[in-house]
Image (cartoon, grey):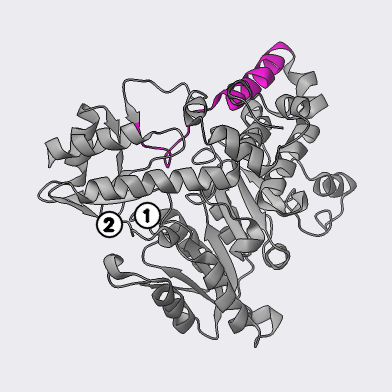
């Protein structure tokens, strides 16, 4: 069944899917949505006087997500206790099922979190490391990964090592990245912790190739000594058309309130079978009936084996946001994950080309689409990144500064942007540069 402009604009989560008879085939999605990206843009209530190239920071809720949040908010405000008691287990399960469907994993391998940071923290903080084990990461990773690993090493007596994945971002290649990682893995390396798409330069790591190389390393090791692969995936999640198995990692942590345009304050962790055996829950879960029953009955077994429910931190949350999460996954599936990826890449490529023609601008993100996603990082000669961002915002272009020791300016086009906005951003930089 084709998707009309009215279908796209009127999406409201599961009800829209049921009325349409399920997620339509990719060919029908391509035919309708690719002809009308303005309809997709119309789902967002962004102010029209600015160019919002900031999807990597925090999402504007699209119409289906806003509608789902509002539905649950009204019900909670009207009858908070009974609505929570009647729906918490069911709607939480629906969120894990939606994430599992999107990533191609069973819901029992999905944990629900509030953010990428929480996901990284609960995985690396709960990893069963032994004294003398080594944790390997890169010098290019973000504070959250570095700090979580530092704390894990202090807790367990493991050692932490950082390596450079390349010498020159202008000349970086897949072979260079994979080769450096393989050469760095030692006999005591137990975890490789990386970021799929770097928020500093926009470099996208060849995750599948890295995972394949680690499989070769692990083939000659006892299970207890094999290297686990953890991936902060937030800037590929909702951009790239890749599932958990295709990435090949053991842990994938991502917030849902960035490129997926999900409810603010939501995130996921997908955990493979080896990962579930290697990590322990650190925060009590309210969605794991087994753990709660064990406590009630005075048992010390924690409710049995590990799974996504046990890894989902408990506590009272903005439930209307958590329960609206399926609407974000459904929207991406209705538009078509492949179409989302192609559109995001096309806009990022157009932006890189436009910026490269601006005198004084040096693009830091690789031009090769295999090594980049939606983040476009650049510098303007003689100007600090903060000054450039301020100058852009004065011209109603919303970008950001990468918060690293070596900062860059970032613009991050997404499906809510247009070719005209790419040109407008380049024109603004011509005035600044």
**Which is nearer the eye, 55 or 276?**
55
- The residue drawn where x is 83% and y is 47% is 295
Is 202 situated left or right of 22 in this image? Answer: left
Q: What element carries label 2?
A: loop
**Which is nearer the eye, 331 or 69?**
331
Asked if residue 205 is positioned above or below residue 30 in the image, the reply reads below
- The residue sitting at the left extreme is 382
- The residue sitting at the bottom extreme is 220
**Which is nearer the eye, 252 or 117?**
252
Residue 252: horizontal and vertical position, in percent?
A: 59, 57
Q: Is residue 284 visible?
A: no
> Is the C-beta separation of discs 2 and 1 under 8 Å?
yes
**Disc ID at residue 202:** 1
Q: Quadrant of the N terminus?
A: top right
Asked if residue 16 is positioned above or below residue 239 in the image, the reply reads above
* Residue 239 within the segment the image draws in magenta: no
User: How many circles with numbers are drawn on the protein?
Assistant: 2
- Which residue carries the number 2 mark? 364
Label 2 and label 1: CA atoms lie apart by: 8 Å
- Tell me where residue 177 sits by quadrant: bottom left
Asked if residue 13 is positioned above or below residue 125 in the image, the reply reads above
Is 425 situated left or right of 210 in this image? Answer: left
Residue 79: horizontal and vertical position, in percent?
A: 75, 14
Residue 139: horizontal and vertical position, in percent?
A: 36, 66
Magenta stretch bounds: 52-78
Residue 105: horizontal and vertical position, in percent?
A: 72, 54
**Disc ID at residue 267:** none
Asked if residue 306 is positioned above or below residue 238 in the image, the reply reads below
Q: In which quarter of the image is the C terminus?
A: top left
Among numbered discs 2 and 1, the one appearing first in the sequence: 1
Q: For the residue carrying disc 1, how many other residues have a C-alpha within 10 Å: few (<14), some (14-19), or many (20+)?
A: many
């Amino acid at each position: 069944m084709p998707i009309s402009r009215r279908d796209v604009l009127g999406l409201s989560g599961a009800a829209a899917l049921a009325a349409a008879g399920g997620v339509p085939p990719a060919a029908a999605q391509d035919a309708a949505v690719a002809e009308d990206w303005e309809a997709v843009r119309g789902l967002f209530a962004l102010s029209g006087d600015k160019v919002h190239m900031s999807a990597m920071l925090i999402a504007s809720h699209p119409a289906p997500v806003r509608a789902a949040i509002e539905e649950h908010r009204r019900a909670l405000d009207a009858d908070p206790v009974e609505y929570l008691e009647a729906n918490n287990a069911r709607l939480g399960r629906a969120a894990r099922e939606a994430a599992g469907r999107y990533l191609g994993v069973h819901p029992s391998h999905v944990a629900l979190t509030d953010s990428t940071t929480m996901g990284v923290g609960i995985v690396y903080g709960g990893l069963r490391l032994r004294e003398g084990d080594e944790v390997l990461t890169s010098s290019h990773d973000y504070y959250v990964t570095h700090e979580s690993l530092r704390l894990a090493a202090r807790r367990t007596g493991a050692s932490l090592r950082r390596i450079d994945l390349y010498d020159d971002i202008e000349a970086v290649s897949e072979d260079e990245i994979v080769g450096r990682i393989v050469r760095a893995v030692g006999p005591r390396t137990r975890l490789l912790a990386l970021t799929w798409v770097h928020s500093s330069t926009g470099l996208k790591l060849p995750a599948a190739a890295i995972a394949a190389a680690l499989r070769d390393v692990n083939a000659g090791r006892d299970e207890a000594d094999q290297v686990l692969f953890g991936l902060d995936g937030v800037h590929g999640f909702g951009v790239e058309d890749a599932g958990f198995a295709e990435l090949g990692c053991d842990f994938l942590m991502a917030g849902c309130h960035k490129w997926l345009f999900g409810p603010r304050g939501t995130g996921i962790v997908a955990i493979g079978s080896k990962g579930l055996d290697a990590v322990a829950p650190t925060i009590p879960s309210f969605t794991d009936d087994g753990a709660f029953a064990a406590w009630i009955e005075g048992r010390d077994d924690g409710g049995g084996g590990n799974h996504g429910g046990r890894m989902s931190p408990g506590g009272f949350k903005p439930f209307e946001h958590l329960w609206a999460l399926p609407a974000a996954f459904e929207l991406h599936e209705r538009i078509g994950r492949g179409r989302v990826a192609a559109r995001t890449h096309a806009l990022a490529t157009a932006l890189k080309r436009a910026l490269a023609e601006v005198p004084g601008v040096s693009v830091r993100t690789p031009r090769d689409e295999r090594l980049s996603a939606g983040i476009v990082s650049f510098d303007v000669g003689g100007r600090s990144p903060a000054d450039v961002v301020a100058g852009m915002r004065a011209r109603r272009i919303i970008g950001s500064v990468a918060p690293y020791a070596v900062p860059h300016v970032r613009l991050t086009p997404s499906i809510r942007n247009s070719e005209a906005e790419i040109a407008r951003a380049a024109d603004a930089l011509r005035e600044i540069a």
